[in-house]
Image (tube, rainbow, N blue to C red):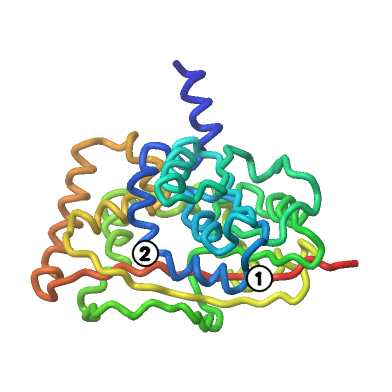
Amino acid sequence: MPTQRNDEIRFDPDQYDDVAERFDRYSERTGFPITECLMEMTQVRRGRHLLDVACGSGIVTRRAAEIVGETGKAVGIDLSPGQIRVARRKAKAQGLGWAQFIVMDAMNLTFPDNTFDVVVAQFPHFPDRGRCIGEMVRVLRPGGRFAICNGGGGATIWGLKNAPTPADIPKGGVVDGLFRSCLETHFPQLIAPPAGNAPVQSVDPQTALRNELEQGGLLEIALGSYAHTSPFHTAEEAFEWESVRTSPYRMQQAALEPQSVEAFKGDYLRRVQKKLDRHGVLGLTTGALLGVGVKPKG
């Protein structure tokens, strides 16, 4: 039994397998404008070959497959078998048979050098970012475009052409930060670690991202940011989405004392419900810091 558990952690270090369905349901509706940013930044078009690293449930890969069409290729790789199963099923349901999904380690991509026209990663949790970015650049063709996004923001807002109409959410209904505030009260030990499988950041995010792209050998580097606030209509669904996307809580929840979890959840729901009763809708924001670069041709 311990061996089985070790295998689960090895293949799914961020513990997404059990929440793959919920992750896809919420992240597709909350993060789709950020996916569109990646598509615009990398100038994806019909016939191109794209690799989506740390693809999760395949949101970016499936969108790319729609753009590149059957004459192109859209491949998603992830360490979580559960996420890959959801991605394959979703692609089949959408009639995107040319989208491919593979369980693979981003630190050791099995593709030959110079395979893809575009390589992207949306909110990846890399244990060794330099090595992973190096692998991503290796499989990118000379002249190809690379884009990655992290949580946060701060850079100039990316002028998304295909931007969604903002939802009508009163400012008082936006509950960003409330989940973390409740965590600090009930489980302060979960606040200190970095998100999921990601390392601690030692410099400001924009400088760190630009440095990573430069060290990867990319040119024409540009940074941008984007944020999208999505409506939620019940306190329970707001809690569920926050529970899925907040890596330290998701990864440790099973080890937490059940009564403490119930107290934490009850506290969050009460506070959120008050806002919902007053404003009629809740808002949760997904923000991203994005970076794009081009692999030299020479």
Residue, far top = 1
Secondary structure of residue under mark 2: helix
Q: Earlier in the sequence, mark 1 or mark 2?
A: 2
Locate the C terminus and report the quarter of the image it occupies: bottom right
The tag on residue 228 is: none
- Is 97 situated left or right of 273 in this image? right
Q: Position of residue 128 (x, y in %)?
A: 66, 49
- Is 125 situated left or right of 240 in this image? right
Residue 297's place in the image compared with 105, above or below, is below
Residue, far left = 277
Secondary structure of residue under mark 1: strand
Q: Amino acid at mark 1?
A: Val
Mark 1 neighbour density, 10 Å: few (under 14) some (14–19) many (20 or more): many
The quadrant in which residue 279 appears is: bottom left
- For image coordinates 38% across by 40% down, the residue present is 252
Question: Front-most of 24 and 259?
Answer: 24
Q: Position of residue 4 (x, y in %)?
A: 48, 20
- For image coordinates 13% across by 63% down, the residue present is 273
Marks 1/2: CA distance? Answer: 22 Å
- For image coordinates 57% across by 59% down, the residue present is 69
Q: Which residue is mark 2?
A: 30
Mark 2 neighbour density, 10 Å: few (under 14) some (14–19) many (20 or more): many
- Is 64 situated left or right of 141 in this image? left
Q: Amino acid at mark 2?
A: Thr
Q: Position of residue 150 (x, y in %)?
A: 54, 63
Q: Which residue is mark 1?
A: 292
- For image coordinates 42% across by 42% down, the residue present is 89
Q: Position of residue 36 (x, y in %)?
A: 50, 70
